[in-house]
Amino acid sequence: METTPSSEQQQQQQQPPIKLPIGFRFHPTDQELLLHYLKRKLYSLPLPPSLIPDHFDVFHSNPWDLPGEEILLLQNKDEFYDQCSLISSDCGYWKSSAKDKQVMAPPPTATNPNLLIGIKKSFLFYHGKTSPLLKTQWFLHQFCLVASFTPPYLLPQKLMMQVGDWVVCRMYQRKRKARNQEANYIRKT
C-alpha cells in the first residue's frame, strides 16, 4: 500500500528555500531557537517558511549529504528517542557526547535572570556499524523546552500533550583546527 504525502507536506516540499541577501545569515542563538521557533511550533503558531524544516529525517541520511555546513531542524521527539545516549542511523550512530546543559532565559527580557527555559543535549556522529568506528566532526545539538517554562494552566488541554513532543536540532560539522597546518607551514619556510 503506497502512502501519499499530505497536502501540507507537498506544499512544504514545493516551497523554494528563502534566499537571504548577500551578507546576511540565519544563525539564531540557543535561546532564540527555544523561544522564537520551538515554542511557536508547540503552540501551532506560524513560523517563517523554509528557515527550519520539520519534514526532514535526520537519521536516515548521512550527515555529510545534508545541504550546507549547518542545518536546523524541527524533529518529533518520538523520532529522536529522547532518553537514548546512542541513536542509530543508516551509516553509523549518534552518541551522547556531553552532559545535558541548561539553557537560561536571556537576562534583558527575563524578570528572573535565572529562569531555565530549556535543555541542550549534544551528540557526536560515529561512522560505521562495527569496529573500528570512525569518530567524525559532525555534531548535533538537541534543544527541548522544559515543562516548567510553559505553565499548564496557560495551555489548552489539547496542547498540554504536545509540549515536549517536538525538539529543535542544530547539526553542523566542526572545522578541523588549522594549528597543525600553520605549524607545518612555519617549519617549511
Image (cartoon, rainbow, N blue to C red):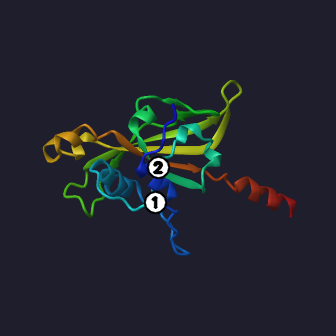
**Residue projecting furthest to the right:** 188
Residue lying at the far left in this picture: please name it: 153
Quadrant (top left/top right/bottom left/bottom right) for the C terminus: bottom right
Residue labelled with disc 1: 51
Residue 95 rendering spot, x and y as whole percentages: 54, 33
Q: Residue at x 38, y 54 (%)?
A: 33
Vertical arrangement, residue 121 with respect to residue 12, above or below:
above
Q: Where does label 2 land, which residue?
A: 73
At label 2, counting other C-alpha atoms closer than 10 Å, the crowd grade (few under 14, some 14-19, many 20 or more) is some
Q: Classify mark 1: helix, strand or loop.
A: loop
Q: Residue furthest front?
A: 1
Q: Amino acid at mark 1?
A: Leu
Is 135 drawn above or below residue 171 in the view shown? above
x then y, percent, for residue 114: 25, 50
Q: Is residue 11 visible?
A: yes
Q: Which of 115 and 141 lies nearest the eye of the viewer?
A: 141
Q: Nearer the viewer, residue 116 or 87?
A: 87
Indicate which disc, 1 or 2, sits on the residue closer to the N terminus: 1
Q: Position of residue 29 (x, y in %)?
A: 41, 58
Residue that lies at the very extreme toward the top in this rendered image? 130
Rendering coords of residue 64 (x, y %): 65, 47
Judged left or right of residue 169, residue 89 is right
